[in-house]
Image: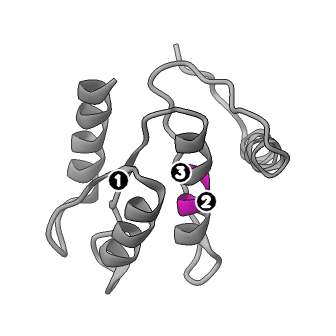
């Protein structure tokens, strides 16, 4: 069963992940590991996703990036660039598609390649 966290606990977990990655550490996880990134526009979510993906790929992990922000102009294209730079797999759909469908397909892809 999935662990239920308060908002404050989730923020501490995110800070822990970022700290480990910045210091060359590895993230401990159970398969499949899903990292969901949310936030307001312009705070660096896409760049952070790219950095996290690159770090995990460098650790020998297989990474699937879900381009679920299907409503923001150029969001998918920006994430495609980061996925290519990090040698990650990207799952995307057309602009305006159902974000949940993108996530569903990304999870299926992760299970397929691992």
Q: Which mark is residue 53?
A: 3
- Looking at the image, do the residues carrying marks 3 and 2 touch, with CB atoms under 8 Å apart? yes
Q: Which quarter of the figure has residue 37?
A: bottom right
Task: Tell which tag, 1 or 3, sits nearer the viewer.
Answer: 3
User: Real-space Cα distance between discs 1 and 3?
Assistant: 11 Å
Task: Tell which tag, 1 or 2, sits nearer the viewer.
Answer: 2
Q: Which mark is residue 66?
A: 1
Q: Position of residue 29 (x, y in %)?
A: 61, 24
**Secondary structure beneath disc 1?**
strand
The residue positioned 63% from the left and 27% from the top of the image is 4
The quarter of the picture where the C terminus appears is top left
Residue 52 on the magenta segment: yes
Kindly identify which residue carries mark 2: 51
**Badge 3, how many Cα within 10 Å: few under 14, some, many 20+?**
many
Q: What stretch is highlighted in magenta?
A: 49-53
- Residue 32 shown left or right of residue 111 in the figure: right
User: Real-space Cα distance between discs 3 and 2?
Assistant: 5 Å
């Amino acid at each position: 069963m999935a662990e239920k966290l308060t908002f404050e606990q989730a923020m501490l977990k995110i800070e822990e992940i970022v700290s480990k990655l910045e210091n060359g550490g590895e993230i401990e996880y159970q398969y499949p590991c899903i990292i969901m990134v949310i936030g307001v526009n312009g705070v660096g979510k896409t760049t952070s996703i790219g950095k996290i993906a690159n770090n995990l790929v460098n650790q020998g992990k297989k990474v699937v990036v879900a381009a679920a922000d299907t409503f923001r102009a150029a969001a998918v294209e920006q994430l495609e660039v980061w996925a290519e730079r990090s040698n990650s797999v990207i799952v995307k759909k057309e602009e305006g598609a159902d974000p949940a469908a993108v996530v569903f397909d990304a999870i299926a892809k992760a299970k397929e390649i691992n």
